[in-house]
Image (spheres, rainbow, N blue to C red):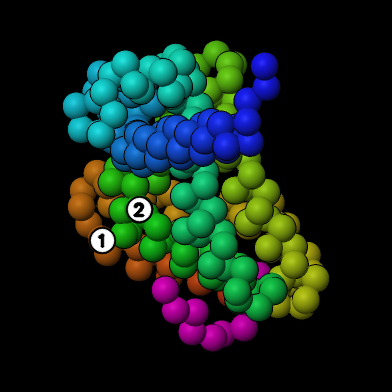
Amino acid sequence: MHDSPAVRSLLTTSSDGRRARGDRSRNAVLDHAVQVASVHGLSGLSFGRLALSSPVNKSGIAGLFGSKEGLQLATVERARDVFVTTVIEPSRTAERGLPRLWALVSGWLAYSRDRVFVGGCFFQTAAAELDAAPPGPLRDAVAAAVTDWRDHIARQIAAAVELGHLDADTDPVQLGFELRAYLELANLESVLTGDARVYERAARAARAALAHHGAPAVDLPL
């Protein structure tokens, strides 16, 4: 016996509604999980801890993610999405070359300073937690995110070199390493000491590094 079109429509609507509710629940849990993990690390995530302060109970969270590792991997992916939305996407409105590179630098400083993640940079916390851990899906996911950021900033430096905004002999990987070091140290000291002045110090250091590689003497605002 075949379902009538009306029954099929009702079943589809019901299924779509359950899926939408599941998506909302999953998003609510992940929005909370990225904040918890930025402070307590990915190992600090548990179904029980998240259930205490999210709209989904422990069994519901288990049903959404299946395992602690599933929750952790989904949390890393959500943190990547937040980072791209907060730092990468806004920089793409800047002119290619030095303006876009500086938009990345200033965007990253604002991302840390404004505590997009309450514990500072999510990926610094995760990398420090997992850097000596044996290879596995979670460590690989964090390493991939860190590597993508490293490669992205190096590509923007290479574009600035190509456009003549930086000296032709500039090594994009080396300069990218130096810029990221300034950013990450500012994040670490700010989180540890509460001193927001480190962000201006990091900005001055980044400006000096770019000037050393031939960037014009212009004011690059935070």
User: Badge 2 is on which residue?
Assistant: 116
Q: Residues within 10 Å of mark 1 (few under 14, many from 20)?
A: some
Position of residue 72 measured from the top left corner of the image (x, y, whole percent):
45, 25
Q: Nearer the viewer, residue 3 or 159?
A: 3
Position of residue 35 measured from the top left corner of the image (x, y, whole percent):
32, 40
Residue at 67% over, 16% down: 1
Q: Name the quadrant of the C terminus.
A: bottom left
Please give the range of residues in magenta: 212-222
Q: Nearer the viewer, residue 93 or 64?
A: 64
Residue 29 within the segment the image draws in magenta: no
Residue at 39% over, 63% down: 110
User: Badge 1 is on which residue?
Assistant: 196
Asked if residue 175 shows in the view, the reply is yes
Q: Main secondary structure of the magenta part?
A: loop
Position of residue 142 measured from the top left corner of the image (x, y, whole percent):
54, 32
Q: Amino acid at mark 2?
A: Val
Q: Nearer the viewer, residue 163 or 108?
A: 108
Q: Tell me which numbered mark, 1 or 2, is placed earlier along the sequence.
A: 2
Q: Is residue 2 left or right of residue 112?
A: right
